[in-house]
Image (cartoon, rainbow, N blue to C red):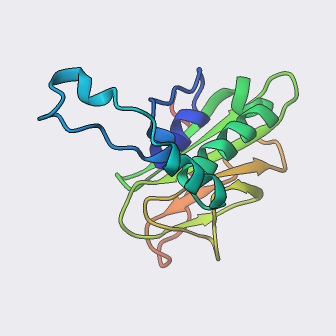
Amino acid sequence: MLAALLVFALPGTPVVYYGDEIGMPAGDSSQFPGDLSKRTPMDWSEVDREDQDEGSLLNAYRELARLRHAHPALFSGTISQVQNLSDAGISFLRTDPMTNESVQVVLNLGETFLTVEETGSVIYGSISNHQLGPKQGAILLKHSQGDRPFIHLKKHPSERLVPRPPLA
């Protein structure tokens, strides 16, 4: 799901490969050699099943598409204030120049929780008690403008929060 969040949060047109939205695996390459194994029919029974489950992968893709359409910062915003934390987390800001709407995207690529100090409203994902779970992502709607990033990452709760300067 982190890959889908990144695809929908970065500039450009999001592209979803056939079946990814339901987690459909490629076909049997021993039965269908080469690229043919990737051209299996859509599993419509899985679509029906995921359609009924609010927490399904299909509905997560729908929510990401809805958010991208609803928030100009995700649709046409510039990217800035890229921050990283070793190989565990990444964060960036998207700002729409016409509306001044800003959203912060944060991804935890690691196996442990990341502590996040946020000053925005979570509009996708879940940050609980300033913790972003392993292999999770979130999108926050920014409440205030300013030069400093409004989200800071740290690896362990005992570490100090240190703003990272934006990349040039």
Q: Nearer the viewer, residue 161 or 71?
A: 71
Q: Nearer the viewer, residue 160 or 86?
A: 86
Where residue 160 appears, as percent x and y from the top left, is 52, 69
Q: Nearer the viewer, residue 85 or 51?
A: 51
Where residue 64 appears, as percent x and y from the top left, is 65, 42
Q: Quadrant of residue 14?
A: top right
Q: Quadrant of residue 71?
A: top right
Q: Nearer the viewer, residue 45 or 97?
A: 45
Where residue 98 appears, as percent x and y from the top left, is 86, 22
The residue under the point 15% across, 25% down is: 33
Q: Please indicate, yes or no, whether residue 147 appears anywhere in the rendered image.
A: no
Q: Is residue 52 left or right of residue 157?
A: right
Please determine whether, in this image, residue 93 is positioned above or below residue 114. above
Count the marks: 0
The residue under the point 51% across, 41% down is: 21
Where residue 34 appears, as percent x and y from the top left, is 17, 23
Q: Please indicate, yes or no, whether residue 65 appears anywhere in the rendered image.
A: yes
